[in-house]
């Protein structure tokens, strides 16, 4: 009969970029049960709508999370635009798509680095983040900021990207693609990575549907859930979009899906640049949100994020609610950890790409 | 985005949720808003990028049944609603019922106060933008300027 | 040999931040900014660390955690509050669950502003922190010297005298 212990994991842990606490009930080295305890980053920012005007609140929405920052700014702006029936110019939609896909690129490369660090592969962490700096340079050149760039606003975007900058983005992405080829070949063919990730933390197709997971976590189990397929009004419909899926459902499949999405993001950015419409980048916003409510969704790098706004004819919204992808993936994390080895716990946690600040707001 | 709002009563909730589960819908979220009438709950379900929302109003001292029997992962939102709003959600699956300790807060039930709930639930019509392939049978609030005035 | 200074090891913790400053802290370690060339290592163990890089305005649940990490670090230690949230609470200063800046939890030596704080600013903050660390090391060295002196001039002769008296008995 094995010995049973409870090991606290987190909130401070070398592989965790953000604090989350798990009580792991172990039988020898196998995890029998994982009980999460969250709330370390709960700031209560949804209640700040009472104090900040609806146009000013976009700065708060962006700071929900530093990695998925642009997506949150976009989602919030889209929700208000839906509420107030504001038609955003086509050029602004395409610019927003370019910045969002650049965000996705930097987020997935960040994840590759952190995942590699959790495996003990420190030089891969350094290489992935070195490549990520190219993306951050492009973002900085076009917006002025590196991680939180405040370029989305209600009614459109704040800055335009010149034709010269657009061409430069495409040529830099071409060069980056060759380096990403090297990275992908390394990760997908390395025997140690196969040994550490294949067959670990497997989530079957039925479980993925029953546990309501979203994003690459769901797509790696074969569930083709990607809101970019259903997005009306954005550039994705015009560019044509198909989600990247895999069937294995283990940590390796989740890694593979994210790597393939890097290529997809580069193609989407090139498509946006080629088909970039001319015109205005924003429309003026007049008046206050009506007494109405609206839901909208954005496919963040981690999955689908749902934004809900309710107006009350004043400058302040009545309610703003954000359901983030990590919030939806908590349940699948608890299930994935049952039956795994203690040494695999950091890998499995990182494999859902946890963004605890998004999850707790 | 295609979306629809269906107002229901508290006793209908579990039946409707079970029907959605049977039809293969994915539960997206549970949303709670403090209103003068009590709590306004919205349960959102998605299939093929269409969002269907069940709306119910729970009075101040009332409670609502947990849907973890159908959608186990709803425990995240039900525990959150209990901790932040103080709304009693009954019969959450025992292994995921945190008993008020899911979120540790500086001030318990910070959303419970009525002071900031400015408008009644009945004042709001769902705003669905036309021209984007959305269900045209429910008109946007701006098309009827005299309705919804406080 | 006076140009050789100590290479500090740092421990990093996210004290309720949005993660923007945290990824900029990690970006300092990566090849573009590369603080590892100065021997600075990001360790996970607070007892190995000299510098505590903390981000975020602290919230109620995180307060005991931040204090515990701070207390576990050996003297001399330096705390660097990175980002607007750690300095004053930032845009979230009036949220219901936020206590405010990091100095409400632990004593802070260097404040690095920015939202998110840029890696150049963070490295600048760490260099200023190094100067503070040196002063604290000198203060600790002075105290150690005094303790040594006291031991030599007062304690040891007293012990020796007692031993002689015991031997005579």
Image (tube, coloured by chain):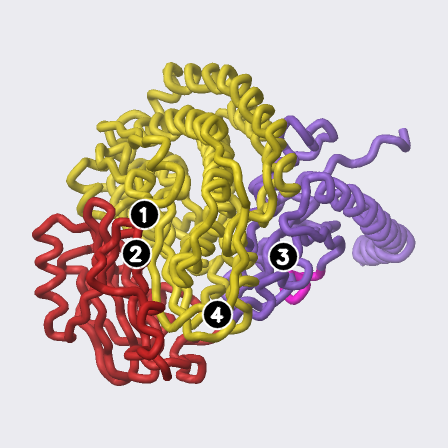
Chain colours: A yellow, B red, C purple
User: What is the number of the mark on residue A288?
Assistant: 4
Query: Is A201 above or below relative to A42?
Result: above
- Provide residue A27's location: percent of width, then percent of height: 27, 43
Residue A48 placement (x, y as % from top left):
51, 68
Q: Is residue C53 magenta?
A: no
- Badge nearest the viewer, 2 or 4: 2
Q: Which residues are magenta?
A: C102-107
Mark 3 vs mark 4: in front: 4
Residue at 54% from the left image edge and 62% from the top image edge: A55
Q: Nearer the viewer, mark 1 or mark 2?
A: 2
Tag 2, which secondary structure? Answer: loop
| Numbered tag placed on residue C71 in the rendering | 3
Badge 2: chain ID? B
Task: Mark 3 vs mark 2: give the one in front.
Answer: 2
Tell me the subunit letter for badge 3: C
Q: State the residue in front, C66 or C162.
A: C66
| Residue A328 in the image, given as x and y percentages of width and height | 31, 51
Q: Which mark is residue B130?
A: 2
* Front residue of this view, candidates B1 and B69: B1
Q: CA distance from mark 4 to mark 1?
A: 35 Å
Subunit of label 1: A
Distance between the Cα atoms at labels 3 and 4?
Answer: 50 Å
Indicate whether A352 appears above or below B121.
above
Do callouts 3 and 2 mark residues in contact (Cβ within 8 Å)?
no
Q: Nearer the viewer, mark 3 or mark 1?
A: 1
Q: Quadrant of the N terminus of chain A?
A: top left
Q: Are marks 2 and 4 in contact (CB under 8 Å)?
A: no
Contact? badges 3 and 1 (CB < 8 Å):
no
Q: Which mark is residue A329?
A: 1
């Amino acid at each position: 009969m094995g010995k049973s212990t409870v090991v606290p994991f987190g909130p401070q842990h070398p592989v965790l970029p953000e604090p989350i606490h798990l009580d792991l009930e172990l039988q020898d080295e196998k995890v029998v049960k994982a009980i999460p305890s969250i709330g370390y980053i709960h700031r209560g920012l949804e209640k700040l709508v009472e104090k900040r005007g609806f146009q000013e609140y976009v700065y708060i929405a962006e700071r929900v999370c530093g990695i998925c920052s642009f997506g949150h700014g976009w989602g919030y702006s889209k929700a208000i635009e839906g509420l107030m029936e504001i038609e955003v110019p086509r050029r602004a939609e395409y610019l927003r798509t370019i910045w969002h896909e650049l965000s996705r690129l930097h987020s997935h490369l960040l994840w590759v680095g952190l995942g590699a660090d959790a495996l003990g592969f420190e030089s891969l962490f350094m290489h992935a983040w070195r490549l990520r700096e190219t993306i951050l340079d492009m973002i900085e050149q076009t917006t002025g900021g590196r991680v939180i760039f405040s370029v989305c606003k209600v009614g459109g975007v704040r800055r335009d990207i010149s034709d010269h900058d657009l061409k430069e983005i495409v040529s830099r992405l071409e060069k980056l693609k060759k380096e990403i080829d090297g990275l992908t070949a390394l990760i997908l063919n390395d025997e140690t990575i196969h040994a550490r990730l294949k067959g670990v933390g497997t989530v079957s197709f039925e479980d993925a549907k029953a546990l309501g997971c979203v994003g690459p976590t769901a797509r790696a189990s074969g569930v083709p859930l990607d809101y970019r397929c259903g997005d009306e009004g954005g550039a994705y419909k015009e560019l044509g979009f198909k989600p990247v899926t895999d069937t294995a459902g283990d940590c390796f499949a989740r890694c593979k899906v994210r790597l393939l999405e890097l290529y997809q993001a580069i193609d989407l950015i090139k498509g946006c640049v080629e088909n970039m419409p001319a015109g205005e980048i924003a429309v003026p916003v007049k008046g206050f949100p009506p007494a109405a409510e609206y839901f909208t969704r954005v496919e963040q790098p981690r999955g689908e994020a749902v934004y809900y706004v309710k107006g009350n004819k004043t400058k302040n919204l009545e309610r703003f609610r954000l359901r983030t992808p990590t919030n939806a993936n908590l349940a699948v994390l608890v299930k994935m950890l049952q039956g795994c080895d203690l040494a695999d716990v950091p890998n499995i946690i990182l494999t859902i790409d946890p963004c605890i600040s998004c999850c707790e707001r | 985005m295609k979306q629809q709002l269906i107002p229901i009563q508290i006793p209908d909730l579990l039946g409707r949720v079970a029907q959605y589960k049977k039809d293969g819908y994915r539960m997206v979220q549970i949303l709670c808003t403090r209103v003068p009438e009590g709590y306004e709950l919205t349960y959102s379900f998605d299939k093929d990028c269409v969002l269907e929302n069940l709306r119910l109003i729970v009075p101040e001292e009332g409670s609502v049944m947990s849907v973890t029997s159908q959608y186990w992962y709803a425990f995240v939102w039900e525990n959150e609603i209990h901790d932040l709003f103080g709304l009693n959600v009954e019969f959450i699956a025992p292994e995921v019922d945190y008993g008020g300790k899911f979120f540790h807060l500086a001030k318990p039930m910070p959303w419970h106060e009525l002071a900031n709930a400015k408008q009644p639930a009945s004042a709001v019509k769902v705003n669905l933008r036309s021209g984007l392939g959305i269900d045209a049978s429910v008109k946007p609030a701006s098309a009827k300027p005299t309705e919804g005035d406080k | 040999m006076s140009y050789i200074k100590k290479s500090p090891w740092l421990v990093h913790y996210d004290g309720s931040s949005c993660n923007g400053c945290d990824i900029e802290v990690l970006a300092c370690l990566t090849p573009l900014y590369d603080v590892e060339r100065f021997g600075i290592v990001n360790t996970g163990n607070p007892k190995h660390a000299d510098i505590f890089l903390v981000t975020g305005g602290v919230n109620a649940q995180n307060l005991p955690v931040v204090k515990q990490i701070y207390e576990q670090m050996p003297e001399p230690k330096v705390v660097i509050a990175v980002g607007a949230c750690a300095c004053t609470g930032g845009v979230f200063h009036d949220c219901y669950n936020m206590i405010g800046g990091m100095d409400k939890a632990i004593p802070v030596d260097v404040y690095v502003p920015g939202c998110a704080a840029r890696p150049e600013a963070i490295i600048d903050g760490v260099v200023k922190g190094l100067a503070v660390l040196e002063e604290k090391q000198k203060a600790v060295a002075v105290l150690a010297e005094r303790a040594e002196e006291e031991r030599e001039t007062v304690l040891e002769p007293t012990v020796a005298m007692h031993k002689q008296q015991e031997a005579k008995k």
